[in-house]
Amino acid sequence: MPTPQSAIIPDHCRASIVMEAAITDSDLGKLAAACRAALTSLQALQDKFPNEQLGLTIGFGVDLWAKIAKDGEGSQLKPFRPLGGGLAPATQADLLFHIQSLRPDVNFKLGSEVVAAFAGLASIERETHGFRYIEDRGLEGFVDGTENPQGENINSVAVINDGVDAGGSYVMVQKYRHDLPKWDKMSISEQEACIGRSKTDNIEFDKADRLPDSHLGRTNLKEDGKTLEIVRRSLPYGTVTGEHGLLFIAYAARLWNIEAQLLSMFGETDGKTDLLLKNVTTAMTGAYYFAPSLERLSQLDA
Ligand code: HEM
C-alpha cells in the first residue's frame, strides 16, 4: 500500500504551519524536483529530531493538479466555491504546504527549507502558524478534536485505500477568525447550545437535546446509515490583540465527506446556518487540495 503523506496520520501535534501558494512556473520537471527537495529536507529533519512527529503534506489545487494527473488521478478534486451567499469565501490556491509536529522551531526550519525548494516556482500567498491551546481547546474555550477518528480508523477515514489514488487524500483548509468579545458576552449554556457539547467537561448532548443548527447538528451527518467522517488536524492561531481563531484543516478519502459538512454548516442544505458562524467565527479563506501518496509525490514527473 502506498504511503500517505506524513502530516495526515499523527494526532495531538502541538504546532503547525499552513502555507498556500500560487504557482509562477508550472514546468513539471522543476515542480517534481522541488517536491523531492522538500521531501529530502523533511527526511533530514525527521532523522535529526526523531521524536517530534514532524510531518509535511504537499497538496495541489485543481488547476495545477490537472497538469500533473494521469489516468483519472484525484478525480474528485474541484475548486472551492463560495458558500452561504459569501459567508464562506473561496480563496483557492495552487499549492498547500501543511507542516505539523510537537515543536514550532522544527516546523519553522522545515517551512524555510520548503519555501527555498520552491523559490522561483511558487509565491506564498498566505502563511499561518497554529498552536495547541490549553487542554486541547479552541480559543472559544471548547475541547476540539474529541470525535476525531482514532487508531486504525484515521487511515481508513483520511486515506484512499485502493485504486489509482491509493495512499492519497483530499484536504480542505479554511481560516476562521473569532470574535471572542462577542462570544464572551454569551452565557456558558448559550455557548454550549451553539456547539452541542458541555464546555468544562466536554460531554456530548443527546441528539434529542441538540439544536439542529448547533455545530454538532450541522456536522454529525449520516448518509445511508453511515457517518460521514473526516480527520481534523486544526489548531488555534493568531495574536492576543490582533486576529485569532481556528486554522481548520481536514483530510478525507472522499471529498464529499468534507463538502457535505460544509454545505450543512453554511445553510446550503436546509437553509440552517451553524450557530458558531452566527455567534463567534467568520470564515476568511477556503480551498480544496489533493495530497497524493508519498511515492507519487516523489515521482510527479514520472
Ligand atoms: C471555527 C470553526 C470551528 C470550530 C470552533 C469548531 C469546533 C468544534 C468543536 C468544539 C467540536 C466538538 C468536539 C470534537 O468532536 O471535536 C467540533 C466537532 C466537529 N467539527 Fe468542528 N469546528 C469548526 C469548524 C468545523 C468545520 C469547518 C467542519 C467541517 C467542514 C467541522 C467538522 C466537525 C466534525 C465532523 C465534528 C465532530 C462531530 C461529531 O461527530 O460529534 N468543524 N468542532
Image (spheres, rainbow, N blue to C red):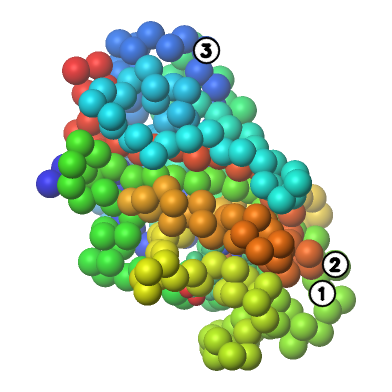
**Residue 268 figure quarter:** bottom right
**Residue 51 figure quarter:** bottom left
Residue that carries the numbered disc 1 in the rendered image? 184
Name the element at disc 3.
loop
Q: Are marks 1 and 3 in contact (CB under 8 Å)?
A: no
At x 55%, y 22%, the residue is: 22
- Three-letter amino acid code at disc 3? Thr
**Residue 58 figure quarter:** top left
Q: Are marks 3 and 2 in contact (CB under 8 Å)?
A: no
- Vertical comparison of 270 with 120: above or below: below
Residue that carries the numbered disc 3 in the rendered image? 24
Where in the image, quadrant-wise, is ligand 1 located?
bottom right
Kindly report the distance in space between the C-alpha atoms of the residues bearing marks 1 and 2. 5 Å
Kindly report the distance in space between the C-alpha atoms of the residues bearing marks 1 and 3. 43 Å
For marks 3 and 2 on the same chain, the one whose residue lies earlier in the sequence: 3
- Three-letter amino acid code at disc 2? Pro
Q: Does residue 233 appear in this view?
A: no
Query: Could you tell me residue 276's position as x and y percent?
Result: 71, 67
Q: Are marks 1 and 2 in contact (CB under 8 Å)?
A: yes
Report whether 150 appears left or right of 263: left
Residue that carries the numbered disc 2 in the rendered image? 181
Report whether 2 appears left or right of 237: left
- Three-letter amino acid code at disc 1? Asp
The answer to whether mark 2 is within 8 Å of ligand 1 is no
At x 44%, y 22%, the residue is: 64
At x 42%, y 60%, the residue is: 230
Query: Could you tell me residue 227's position as x and y percent?
Result: 40, 70
At x 47%, y 10%, the residue is: 25
Question: Dot 3, how many residues are within 10 Å of its Cα: few (below 14), some (14-19), or many (20+)?
Answer: few
Kindly report the distance in space between the C-alpha atoms of the residues bearing marks 3 and 2. 40 Å
For marks 1 and 3 on the same chain, the one whose residue lies earlier in the sequence: 3
